[in-house]
Image (spheres, rainbow, N blue to C red):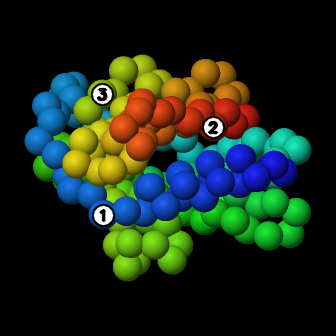
Amino acid sequence: MNTQVKTTLFLAAMAVSACGNNTEKPEPEQPEGESQLTKAEWLIGRWENNSEEGNLSETWTKTEDGSLEAKTYFVIGTDTVFREHVRLEEKDGVVSYLANVSGQNGGSPVAFKMTKMEGHTMVFENPNHDYPTMITYVHKGDSVIAEISGNQNGKPAKERFAMVRK
């Protein structure tokens, strides 16, 4: 795996783990009787991307309280170089994406508020976070693309992680 890829993955882990605040964004519209989390259950299962750089896996489950949780790992050879725990929870009609990277941010999650839910596309934002400020998930068939974006070193930046259902 080349040094640039390792550096990008390390920077992405560090960025997600940095302190962030929730933001006042418009709440996505929600049809009566159906929660946003119910519409996000297509995430449940194991998603992977196996490449020359390593193995990225994200496994989503539904908890007893109805929230969704994911454990994400990036493994190079036998070394886990990135580990993240994500929780999607809904409180008072607002869905939050809570990202907690192992060994970062004093064990506290960084919160991103859902700003869009259309079909199988979800967007979460926290404009007060350094990088990323936006996390997007797009589901198409047996694949999902997770994308992080925002400004990095004063320039627009975007990283895409394509995964298939296993």
Give coordinates of residue 68: x percent, y percent. 44, 53
Rendered residue at 53%/72% (across/down) = 102
Instruction: Decide if residue 57 is on the left or right side of residue 93.
Output: right
Q: Are marks 2 and 1 in contact (CB under 8 Å)?
A: no
Q: Residues within 10 Å of mark 2 (few under 14, many from 20)?
A: few
Screen quadrant of the C terminus: top right
Q: Is residue 52 above or below residue 143?
A: below
Q: Are marks 2 and 3 in contact (CB under 8 Å)?
A: no
Per the image, the residue denoted by label 3 is: 116
Tag 3 secondary structure: strand
- At label 1, which amino acid type do we have? Cys
In the rendering, which numbered label is found on residue 161? 2
Per the image, the residue denoted by label 1 is: 19
- At label 3, which amino acid type do we have? Lys
Rendered residue at 37%/32% (across/down) = 123
User: What's the CA distance linking mark 3 and mark 1?
Assistant: 23 Å
User: What's the CA distance linking mark 2 and mark 3?
Assistant: 19 Å
Instruction: Decide if residue 13 is on the left or right side of residue 22.
Output: right
Task: Judge by depth and name the residue closer to the eye, 139 or 135.
Answer: 135
Q: Earlier in the sequence, mark 3 or mark 1?
A: 1
